[in-house]
Amino acid sequence: MCGIVGYIGKRNAYPILIKGLKRLEYRGYDSAGIALLNSKNELNVYKTKGKVSNLEHFAKDKDCNGTIGIAHTRWATHGEPNQINAHPHYSESKNIALIHNGIIENYADLKENLTRKGIHFQSNTDTEVIVQLIEYLLQKNDTDLLTAVQLALSHVVGAYAIAVIDRNNPDVIVAARKSSPLVVGIGDDEFFIASDASPIVEYTKKMVFIDNEEVAYIKRGEELKIVNLNNVEIKPEIEEVMLDIGQLEKGGYEHFMLKEIFEQPACIENCMKGRVNIAHDSIKLSALIDFHDKLVGAKRIIILACGTSWHSGMIGKYLFETYCKIPVEVEYASEFRYRSNVVGENDVVIAVSQSGETADTLAAVELAKEKGAFVYGICNSVGSSIPRATHTGSYIHVGPEIGVASTKAFSGQVTVLVMLALALAKSKNAISDKDYFEIIAELAKIPEKMKKVLQMNEKIADLAKIFTYAHNFIYLGRGYCFPVALEGALKLKEISYIHAEGYPAAEMKHGPIALIDDEMPVVVIATQNALYEKVVSNMQEVKARKGRIIALISEGDEKIKDIANFCIEVPQTLECLEPLITTIPLQLLAYHIAVCKGKNVDQPRNLAKSVTVE
Ligand code: AGP
C-alpha cells in the first residue's frame, strides 16, 4: 500500500523524507516521489518508477534544499506504475503538490467537471483530481489553503490520507485522512507526518493519530491544529508511542521475516505479560472486565478477517466452541461486507487484523456496528483504524511486523484468542478448573517450546533445498492444525510463488488425492493428539500413491518415521496450543524454500503488507 511522509521544521527535509520512505518500503510499492519547497519558495517535485533508490539517484544532482517537504511511495490502483502517475501530483499552476494514500471512488465525475472548467490533467490517477480541485476552489472562492482542502474533501467519496504543500504558503502543511492511516509526530519546533509511526519514532515519540474526516493544519512556529471538514476545532490527543527503532532494523538477520520468526518466543511472552498470571492461575483481559456482560452474553461469535488473520480466526473458532460453548462463524471480511448477512445485538464480532488497516476488515467492522453487533478488535498496530473503530479489543503486542508474510502476528493473534477464550469460558463457568489451570500452565511453557522448535532451523533449511524446484505442495492437518495447514500453504505461496493448498486431512479422499504422485510433496501435521491415528491413515493413503511426505511429528514418535520421507520433530503440547508450535516449522520451510529460489522474501511480488484498498 502507499506510504506517506512529510516534514516541516528547522532541518533539511530531504534526508528525513527519503529515510522515512525507506521505513515504509515494507508496505509494498511501485514508484516513489518527493516535493520540496526551498528557501526561494520554489516547489521542486522529483518522482520515479521503481524503488526509493531510483528516486535518490534521480535527485542526486538536483536542488533538494528546503525545510518543508512531502514524499510518497505508490502502490498503483488507478493508472499504471510510471513516473507521470507517481506522487506527488502538481496542481495546474504547479504551485501546489499533494500526496495521497487511498482510492477516490468518484474521481471520474470530479475529473469530468474540472476538465469542463478548462483544467488540464497530467496523469491517469484518481489522486490528481484532489490537488486540481483544491486549487480550483482556492482560486474560485479566493480562500485560504485549509478551507480549500476542507471544501475539496467534502466533495470526495472514498478513502484518503493526504498531505498538501503550497509555494504560496511556505510555512504550512495541510494533511487529512478518511479510512487510510495518518500520524502526526510532534518534535521540538518541527513536525512529521507519516502513514504509521515507523518513519517518525526516531525523531519523536509524541504522536497524534488523525481520525476520520479530520484535517491537520501544521504551521511552522505554531501548535498543531486539528479541525474537521466543518472547521470545528478538535483537541489533539498526543500519545507516547514506545516503538524501539531496533525493532525496525533487521537485527543481524538476512530478512525481516526470519527475524520475526525468531522473535516469536519473546513476542508471545510479551503478549501474555500482565494478562496471564501463573502464580494465581488466572487470565485477565481488560476488555473482558470492561465489557463483561456483553461478551459473556454473546449468543454467537462472528470472526472477521483476511489472509493469515483469517487462519488465526479459524483457530479461534475451535477455541470458543470447545471451551465457551458459543457457536462461531469465521468470515472472510470481503465476503461478509457484501453479503446480505444476519447480524444483530446478540452477536459479538471479533475483527482480527495485524495492520489494523485492511480495508475489507475495516468496512466489515463498520457494517457489523451499524447492525448492532458488539465489535472486539484483535490487532497489532496501536492506534490504527480498526482498533479505533471497534468497541473494545486487545492488542497482540508483538512489535512492528515488517515482513509482508505474517509470522509473529499470527502467533500473537492465536495467543490472544487462547487467552480470550479461556477468560470468557471461566466467566461463563463453561470450563472445568482442571482444563483452565492445565491450559494456563502449558501456555506459560510455550515460549520455551517455541525456542526448541527454532533449533530445527538448519535442518529445515537443508530440507528446503530438496524442494526448491517443486511446482505444487499440499498441506494437511486436522482439528486445530487444519488452519495451520492453510497457513503453511499461504506462507509458501506468497513468498516462493509455488502453488500450495491446505486441506483438512480427511478431505483428500474427496478429490485432492487425484493430485498425489511422486512429484507432489505433501506436508502433514501429524502430532500425537486425539486425531493422530486418523492422520496416520491419511498418510498411508498418500504414501500408497508415492506422495513425498514431510511430517511434523511429536518428539519421540518412531511410528511415523517408517511412513514419512522426512520428519520434523516438535515438542508435545496441548492440542489447543499446537498451532503455536506447529506453525513455526512451516514458516521456516516456506522461508528457506523462497531464499533458495532467490525470491524477495520481505517484499514478495504483487503483495503489500497492508491491503488498505479493496
Ligand atoms: C499474510 O502473510 C499476508 N500478508 C496477508 O494474507 C495478511 O494476513 C492479510 O492481508 C490480512 O492483513 P491484516 O492482518 O493486517 O488485516
Image (cartoon, rainbow, N blue to C red):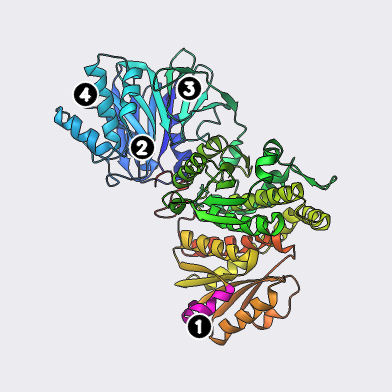
**Residue 482 located left or right of residue 155:** right
Which mark is on residue 191? 3
**Label 2, label 4: how many angstroms apart (C-alpha)?**
26 Å
- Give me the residue at 57% from left, 23% from top: 238
Q: Residues within 10 Å of mark 1 (few under 14, many from 20)?
A: some
- The image shows residue 475 at horizontal and vertical percentages of 55, 70
- Label 3 or label 2, whichever lies nearer to me, is 2
**First along the sequence among labels 3 and 2:** 2
* Residue that appears at 45% across and 39% down: 22
| Disc 4 packing (10 Å; few <14; some 14–19; many ≥20) | few
**Residue holding disc 4:** 93
* Residue 158, numbered circle: 2
Q: CA distance from mark 1 to mark 3?
A: 60 Å
Q: Amino acid at mark 4?
A: Ser
Magenta stretch?
505-517
Question: In front here: 168 or 54?
Answer: 168
Observer-nearest residue: 150 or 216? 150
Query: Can residue 514 be found in the magenta stretch?
Result: yes
Q: Secondary structure at mark 1?
A: loop
Q: Amino acid at mark 1?
A: Asp
Q: CA distance from mark 1 to mark 2?
A: 50 Å
Of callouts 3 and 4, the N-terminal one:
4
Residue contact at pointers 1 and 3, CB within 8 angstroms: no
The dot on residue 476 is: none
Residue matched to label 1: 518
Q: Residues within 10 Å of mark 3 (few under 14, many from 20)?
A: many
Vertical arrangement, residue 571 with respect to residue 284, above or below? below
Q: Are marks 3 and 2 in contact (CB under 8 Å)?
A: no
Q: CA distance from mark 3 to mark 2?
A: 27 Å
Amino acid type shown at disc 2? Gly
Disc 1 under 8 Å from ligand 1? The reply is no
